[in-house]
Image: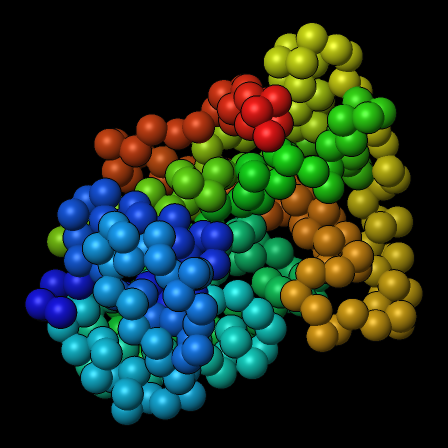
Amino acid sequence: MSRGFVAVAGATGGLGQLIAKALRARNVPVKALVRLNTSPSRTSELHDIGVKISPVDLSDVPTLTNELNGAICVVSALQGLQDVIHTAQGNLLDASVAAKVPRFIPSDFSLDFTKTAPGSNRNLDLRREFHPRLDASGIAWTSIFNGGFMDLLGGESPMINDKTRKVAYIGSDSQLVDFTTMVDTAAFTAAVATDPNPTPRYLRIASDVVSPRDIANVKSEVYGAKYQPSYMGPVWVIERMIPVMRLFGGEDKVMNAWQGMQYMTNMYSGLARAKNLDNDHYPEIKWTKLVDFIRADKEKKQTA
């Protein structure tokens, strides 16, 4: 592949694939780093839009380095626990440095964990703990904080019960929460990856900023039926329940009941909310409002 490409690790995942597509929409050469023995069915869509598929062993730093020669940016969309976020992503970082890649975007796509307390969220702690390694590497890097994925409010949503028309929340139903669609997150990431200028260490975005009450009102408007916020308890009670829930296991799973509770306490405490958004950093990006997302989700359900 010619010089000037962006490498995307984890490109067969939901967000990784969207990032690769957003880069191709900008006519940027893309190399997808996928695991060895990845089924062609998982990469065919990327291949069809001109993405170069490169099966790699993420433990083989010399081979990774060779694959990254000529890259202008490496985007990590890897998802997992310590063996992925620290070990595999760490190998990717080491290879990026060895290949003299100018920019690295770690897999930090989530709540703003620079504002949350260590120990309050296992998955976010893993990402926070990786930052000293990024600092020590000497590479220019940028984390993108997108709040919660708005996609969690569509389909079979864990937060919205369409049968009972309830929107689950803890704390206050007026607490504002940052939500960004995966498509918008991918578009912003592609802009950062291809920016010819230095980018800030942290960039914070949100397609929309809404409360549980706002979500219920939008659902009511789109569906023509009354949705209501459903109180699940105060934040501090849920926080105290989490250690008890962890006694029953789940440490080997990326997402489980207590991990979901950790995300909820971070979101509805208000601590993880970005007060100053960087949405205007790339004016060409059009942000998806919640009402438009819910309308599109309704149409998708009706045609399914």
Residue at 77 percent across and 35 percent down: it is: 169
The quadrant holding residue 56 is bottom left
Residue 245 versus residue 192 in the image, above or below: below
57 or 123, which lies in front?
Answer: 57
Coordinates of residue 195 in the picture (x, y in percent): 19, 51
The reply to whether residue 50 is visible in this rendering is: yes
45 or 82, which lies in front?
Answer: 45
The answer to whether residue 177 is left or right of residue 66 is right
The N terminus is located in which quarter? bottom left
Residue sitting farthest toward the left: 2
70 or 156, which lies in front?
Answer: 156
The C terminus is located in which quarter? top right
Residue at 77 percent across and 52 percent down: it is: 261
Residue at 21 percent across and 55 percent down: it is: 50
Coordinates of residue 251 in the picture (x, y in percent): 75, 73
Coordinates of residue 136 in the picture (x, y in percent): 35, 81
The quadrant holding residue 90 is bottom left
The reply to whether residue 106 is visible in this rendering is: no
How is the structure coloured here? rainbow
The answer to whether residue 44 is left or right of residue 270 is left
Coordinates of residue 157 in the picture (x, y in percent): 69, 38
Residue 256 versus residue 288 in the image, above or below: below
Q: How many numbered discs, if any?
A: 0
Residue at 57 percent across and 69 percent down: it is: 80
